[in-house]
Image (tube, rainbow, N blue to C red):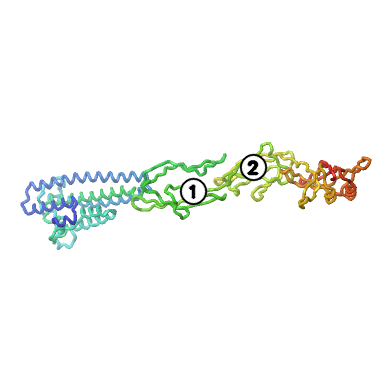
Amino acid sequence: MATSKNKSVNRMSPREKMINLMYIVLTAMLALNVSSDVLNGFSQVQDGLTRSNRTIMARNQALYAQLQAFNEKNPEKGKVWLDKATQVVGETDKLYNYIDSLKLLIVKTADGEDGDVNNIRSRDNTEAASVVMLPPKETGRPGNGKILRSRIDQYRQFVTSFLDDPEKRQNLEAALSTVPPKARGEEMSKKNWEETMFDNMPCIAAVTLLTKLQNDVRYAEGEILNQMLTNVDLGDLRVNLVNAFVVPDSRIVMRGTKYSAHIVLAAIDTTQRPIVYVNGSHLNNNTGIYEVATSKAGNYEYSGWIEVLGRDGTVTKRDFKSSYTVIDPLATISATMMNVLYAGINNPISIAVPGVPEGSISATMTNGTLTKSGDGWVAHPSKVGAECVISVTAEMDGQRTNVGSTTFKVRKLPDPTPFITYKDDKGQPNRYKGGKPFSKALLMAAGGLDAAIDDEILNIDYKVVSFETVFFDSMGNAVPELSNGSQFSERQKAAMRRLSHGKRFYISRVKATGPDGITRDISPIEVIVN
């Protein structure tokens, strides 16, 4: 027995106390002439342990069934623990059945081949257990008792390897200990475990001790299965708040494209916020909101990881990667009655698709050509009077999508206005378009006649082919003079020199050719000499 001093140092579990008490009873029993009352007492203990074994076995089967059910629902998570549990159950059954075979062998040695463990006739037989478990030393072969001790030691090392809790490990080691009972006291025994257990032990007592050992094995099995069932969720993250979230790929969706969103349950632990790192830097808030200023349009990528503490104290790390697109503020305003392109010239066109980079946009045109030019486009219609359609496609979600089209009317260029180019007082070029006094000196310095469309919408130069000036003599007769192409002829300049203050002449029959290649007659101008 353990002394009171040892008890204060090493607290014994209830099982250890029961074992010590049983050995005290057995020692007293052996010192006396074993009575039928004592034997009946062992029979009652045997029956109680047998019932207890059935109860523990049913509980262990229920634990194993829970692991099987979890594995069917979540094999990725449950298989590793079910495999370990299956191994434990297999090793336990082997040892349990081996002990069963020893019990039957002892009973048959005492009662004969028809011996029944549940109805032992020679309960007081003190030789059967020794014969079965402790063969004579001169035989030189290990007895069943030594084999049993070795198998218990192996089983104890096997099952305790699944326990991380020191207290649980210590309890199992004590329950399956093969240290001779007296070695725990102050006097060391010279007998080994199997001799202490089975030497001169009555048949009923030996069977009861083996049943108690089976009880300890089932108890160990149950502890391991319960631990494995707990371990199934041990690596899971602890949560106390679950919310539903919709995470769209984009909040801007164009007609004809798909709206895509992830609808998920997000679970968090409000007492243990995850740590978020974005592009290597710790996020400076505990809400997981990532905000960044946008100063330039374009595509931007970012990545990082999230760290969260699990229930078992381990840190779980998950990487993430995402991107976003910054676009310039954009509003499209157009006059629906003035969708006009001019034939024969390059018409600048601006094409933009909100949320789509310029490099992912393409466009085509009917009745002409459409080409990319810098940040814009140039449309060159070919046939006047026919409509042209500009169609735009964009690459979204990895495929080309038609995002819209616009129809334009094609018109010829309007007639230009003729003018005389001169330089003002500051030496800047200017245009005299007639109808008001014009300095004779500036008139004589001018080289000829020009034409252009300069209505602040179009700014297109024309080439003057020819024109005619009409002067009036003293009799009021009209005197026409022809130009030298776009330049004043000598006869025209001579007539200009003869003009006095307040006189006027007309420039008419002006012919000019534009960039569309069309030569047209344009309006005349009146020149008043100042």
Residue placed under numbered mark 1 in the picture: 291
The amino acid pointed to by label 2 is Ser
Q: Residue at x 31, y 48 (%)?
A: 230
How far is the residue under mark 1 from the one under mark 2?
37 Å
The amino acid pointed to by label 1 is Glu
Q: Is residue 235 above or below residue 263?
A: below
The numbered mark at residue 391 is 2
Residue 67 in the image: state x and y as whole percent: 32, 46
Judge left or right: residue 294 versus residue 22: right
Q: Specify the quadrant that holds the N terminus.
A: bottom left
Judge left or right: residue 121 versus residue 388: left
Q: Specify the quadrant that holds the C terminus.
A: top right
Judge left or right: residue 308 versus residue 279: left
Residue 434 in the image: state x and y as whole percent: 81, 43
Judge left or right: residue 117 versus residue 454: left
Helix, strand or loop at mark 1? loop
> For the view shown, which residue lies furthest in the right direction?
475
Q: Is residue 263 above or below residue 283?
A: above
- Mark 2: few/some/many CA within 10 Å (<14, 14-19, 20+): some
Q: Earlier in the sequence, mark 1 or mark 2?
A: 1
Residue 392 in the image: state x and y as whole percent: 63, 43
The quadrant holding residue 255 is: top right
The numbered mark at residue 328 is none
Q: In the image shown, does 267 or 90 lie closer to the viewer? A: 267
- Mark 1: few/some/many CA within 10 Å (<14, 14-19, 20+): few
Number of marks: 2
The quadrant holding residue 191 is: bottom left
